[in-house]
Image (cartoon, rainbow, N blue to C red):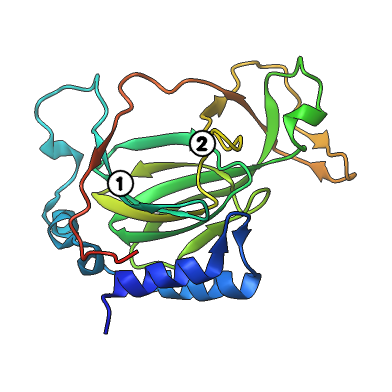
Amino acid sequence: MPYYIQRLFNTCKASLSPNGPVSEESLDKLRTMLEKIKPSDVGLEQEAQLVHNWSGPGNDRNGNHNSLPAIKYLHLHECDSFSIGIFCMPPLSIIPLHNHPGMTVVSKLVYGSMHVKSFDWAEPDPSELDDSLQARPAKLVKDTDMTAPCPATTLYPTTGGNIHCFKAITHCAIFDILSPPYSSTHGRHCNYFRKSPILDLPGEIEAMNGEVISNVTWLEEYQPPDNFVICRVPYRGPVIRK
């Protein structure tokens, strides 16, 4: 029988297209497969053991708080229909708030614990809005801790928390399947956001569909700090036959 990661890859090929998931049924099948992924399926047994050996932030005695811990990215595959990758995050590392325009993302926390905060836009695409509006209203979807094992999550182009950020609590790894993948050619850029510093923005708005949204968070695009580093490292798990 093929390695589990091979079976997951085959399910991706059958379930995903350049326009995203083929159907909700195919997406359910993919999510069910991803639910069962383990560190040993992707060559991360040793990294997963770091969770048990870590005794908290007091372990860091170097006193250097000017640089964030580097995050590792393991690239498994990319084609027109989907990309597969794993982010390995050391404790206290942060992936800032970012979006997935026009994309469906299925994610699974493989090991460890992290805090997740996510939003969806309260209004449509900015091309339909006043060009002078630099900050956009967003509604909170999730603000919670996650600890493996936990269910896989799905975000959609306009729902489910398409704009999200991660903060590692312990050593952790998040397995991501993006469909379709980021593509500058097709206008799917990864943009980063932060809460707008403007103080007089309304906390409640009425969306174009008439829905009144309370506790609005206004987000503006920005460049993440120079000390935000993601290092691409080789994937050393079972070979995927493509």
226 up-or-down from 186: above or below: above
Tell me if residue 182 can be seen: yes
Mark 2 residue crowding within 10 angstroms, few (<14) / some (14–19) / many (20+): many
Can you name the residue that lies furthest to the right here? 210
Q: For marks 2 and 1, give the CA distance.
A: 19 Å
Between disc 2 and disc 1, the foreground one is 2
**Secondary structure at numbered mark 2:** strand
> Splitting the image into 4 quarters, where does residue 208 fall?
top right
Q: Which residue is mark 1?
A: 169
* Horizontal and vertical percent position of residue 43: 18, 61
228 up-or-down from 104: above or below: above
Tell me if residue 31 can be seen: no
Residue 105 horizontal side relative to residue 87, left or right: right
184 up-or-down from 236: above or below: above
**Residue at 74% across, 35% down:** 125
Q: Which residue is mark 2?
A: 98
**Residue at 23% across, 33% down:** 69
**Residue 120 disc label:** none
142 up-or-down from 222: above or below: below
Of the pair 79 and 235, the residue shown nearer to us: 79
Residue 220 horizontal side relative to residue 98, left or right: right
Of the two numbered discs 2 and 1 on the same chain, state the one appearing first in sequence. 2
**Secondary structure at numbered mark 1:** loop
Of the pair 205 and 37, the residue shown nearer to us: 37
Q: Amino acid at mark 2?
A: His
* Horizontal and vertical percent position of residue 127: 77, 28
**Residue at 28% across, 56% down:** 112
Q: Quadrant of the N terminus?
A: bottom left
